[in-house]
């Protein structure tokens, strides 16, 4: 079975690994992302973690076809650099693909993280069989990718656009983009943590499983805003299925039940009846899996 290296660069963490053609993660590691740090330092850290994994596959007689790189933010038309993301300012305009190819001596393919995530869901996960699929990833920010009739939607910045920056509440939380009340600002890990008294997301998810009232309330409020945002996006993309991924989605029904309830309240009747909202089963690894998959088998 063919293999690809995989890198998923997020606002706070970078996931690194080897992924097989069937979407299974062969090896994986996580390193911190420093959003304000020097780009070369991040490249050095990625190579330091990924190169031993690549060497181990080579020693076992297995070849790695290339490296898929999922990065948060808009890409340039050559897919050589990220050109816009308020959560990763240090990488803006940096020739990331070239830097990685020079260090790893392998062809690297850059992809917008939201595209990579929705491809993973479409090929291997909760999006299989969908005709019009909207994939949303929750974490430091909010990303959204769209697949319609088997094709990725490329509208702005080599993706469906910055879906996290539709405005839900003009007096809401300040957003990293400079506006207020963006969908991203209302449902990000920072917003969730704030509602739970400053607890980190992992702790909130863990405490919610123990039915901690504050954790459950924070997730319910976050889900309410997300449901409103998805209802607002539905007339644009007309999805028959919406998959919610990223680290916060690990909360499962503690988040999803509120999302669905809010969606039913805010969406028009046609979407309430036809659109299914389900959680990802990848526990935050969908960006890495999708990036590798696109390296092995590109999607239109």
Image (spheres, rainbow, N blue to C red):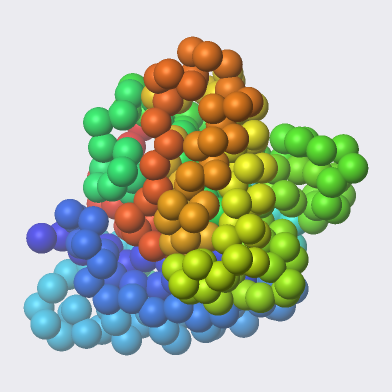
Q: Residue furthest right?
A: 171
Can you say whether 145 is above or below 175 in the image?
above
Q: Is residue 136 left or right of residue 147?
A: right
Depicted 44 relative to depicted 154: above or below: below
- Image-quadrant location for residue 37: bottom right
- Which one is nearer the viewer's eye here, 82 or 136? 136
Return the residue nearer the eye: 91 or 99. 91
The percent coordinates of residue 77 (x first, y second) are 57, 40
Say if residue 83 shows up in the picture: no
Image position of 242 (left or right of 10) = left
Answer above or below: position of 99 versus 78: below
Q: Which residue is depicted at the point 60% across and 27% down?
A: 265
Which residue is at 33% across, 24% downward? 131
- Horizontal placement of 261 versus 214: left or right? left
| Relative image position of residue 170 (x, y in whole percent) | 87, 38
Question: Residue 130: image x %, image y %?
Answer: 31, 29
- What's the residue at 77%, 36% (across, down)? 167
Q: Is residue 261 left or right of residue 63?
A: right
**8 over 280 or under it: above or below:** below
Q: How many marks?
A: 0
The answer to which quarter of the image holds residue 163 is top right
Residue 196 seen in the figure: yes
């Amino acid at each position: 079975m063919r293999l690809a290296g995989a890198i998923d660069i997020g606002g706070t963490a970078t996931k690194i690994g080897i992924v097989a053609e069937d979407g299974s993660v062969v090896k994986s590691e996580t390193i911190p992302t420093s959003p304000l740090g020097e780009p070369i330092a991040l490249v050095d850290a990625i190579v330091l973690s990924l190169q031993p994994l690549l060497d181990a596959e080579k020693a076992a007689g297995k070849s790695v076809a290339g490296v898929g790189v999922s990065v948060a933010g808009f890409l340039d038309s050559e897919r050589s650099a990220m050109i816009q993301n308020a959560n990763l300012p240090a990488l803006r305009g940096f020739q990331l693909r070239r830097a990685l190819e020079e260090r790893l001596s392998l062809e690297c393919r850059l992809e917008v993280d939201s595209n990579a995530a929705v491809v993973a869901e479409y090929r291997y996960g909760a999006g299989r069989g969908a005709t019009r699929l909207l994939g949303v990833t929750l974490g430091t920010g909010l990303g959204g990718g769209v697949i319609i009739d088997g094709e990725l939607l490329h509208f702005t910045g080599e993706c469906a656009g910055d879906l996290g920056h539709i405005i839900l509440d003009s007096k809401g939380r300040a957003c990293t983009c400079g506006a207020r009340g963006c969908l991203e600002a209302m449902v990000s890990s920072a917003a969730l943590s704030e509602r739970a008294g400053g607890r980190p997301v992992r702790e909130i998810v863990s405490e919610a499983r123990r039915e901690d009232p504050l954790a459950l309330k924070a997730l319910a409020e976050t889900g309410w805003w997300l449901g409103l945002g998805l209802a607002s996006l539905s007339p644009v993309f007309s999805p028959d299925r919406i998959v919610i991924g990223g680290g916060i989605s690990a909360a499962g029904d503690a988040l999803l039940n509120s999302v669905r309830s809010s969606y039913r309240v805010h969406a028009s009747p046609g979407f309430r009846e036809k659109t299914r909202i389900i959680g990802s089963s990848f526990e935050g690894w969908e960006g890495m899996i999708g990036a590798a998959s696109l390296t092995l088998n590109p999607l239109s």
